[in-house]
Image (cartoon, rainbow, N blue to C red):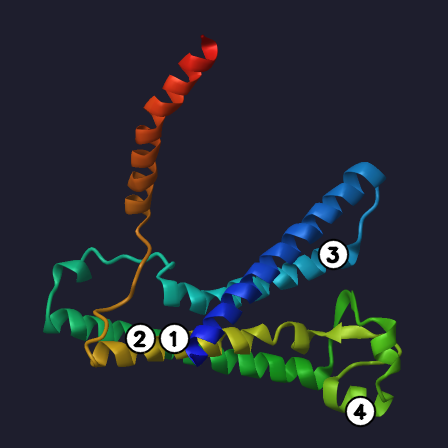
Amino acid sequence: MISRLFGYFEEGFLNLLITLMTLLVFGEVIARFFFNTGFLWIQELTLTLCGWFVLFGMSYGVKVGAHIGVDAFVSKLSGKPQKMVAIFACLCCVIYCAMFLKGSWDYLTQMYQIGIPMEDIDFPAWFIHQLDPDYAWETLRIDVEDGAVPIWLSQSILLIGFSMLTWRFIELFIAILRNQAVGFQLADEAKDSMHLIDEAAKSAPEQQEQTDKDAK
């Protein structure tokens, strides 16, 4: 039940991020081409949302098998050899995530201690007015006189994203040990492309027939 609810949250959050990015870019294009103006904060916010989308979505990609990989060798194996290769691959992925988690923690810790703000994104004035200046700086590294969003907060997705990715790989590792999975689920671009071509070939005669009817 909890896993299902979290799955809904993942999908909803990713949909929200891509929707916000689309609206922001659309608004910026309209402002530039029709009103000869622009907003610096839109560009920075769009890049930040894009980072959140990628880093939050990479664990979801593992869950649904959306990542692309090379399995020409592994697919030829079966039984225990395939299981051992899958276990080794999972361990490599967990180690990779652990390295990024360590680097992300060190980076965000430094950004927090220094208190570097973002360039063009500020908190709303009503929010800043509610904060105690000493608490805001000592705890959140927010300068109430400037009101800018601190970098450590906007880039905290580094820890969140790689923590979720690590969790997904550990889940897969346990599933392989329990013989509930044989390895990574990978996206098959060739298969998907052939499926699209097949659908297009099937629909072509119907479209041509409809075109002939319209012409008559």
Q: Which disc is residue 42 wearing?
A: 3
**SS at mark 3?**
helix
Circles 4 and 1 in contact, beta carbons < 8 Å: no
How many residues crowd mark 3 within 10 Å: few (<14), some (14–19), many (20+)?
Answer: some
Marks 4 and 2, the one that precedes in the sequence: 4
Q: Position of residue 136 (x, y in %)?
A: 80, 86
Q: Of discs 4 and 2, which sits in the foreground?
A: 2
Question: Label 4, on which residue?
Answer: 135
Q: Earlier in the sequence, mark 4 or mark 1?
A: 4
Q: Above or below — where is 190 with respect to 51?
A: above
Task: Please report whichever mark, 1 or 3, sits nearer to the chain's N-terminal start.
Answer: 3
CA–CA distance in space, label 3 to label 2: 38 Å
Tell me the element at label 4: helix
Q: Which residue is mark 2?
A: 172
Q: Tell me: residue 210, above or below residue 8.
A: above
Residue type beneath disc 2: Leu
Label 1: few (<14), some (14–19) or many (≥20) C-alpha neighbours in 10 Å:
many
Please, what is the three-letter code of the amino acid marked with disc 3? Ile
Disc 4 from disc 2: Cα separation: 42 Å
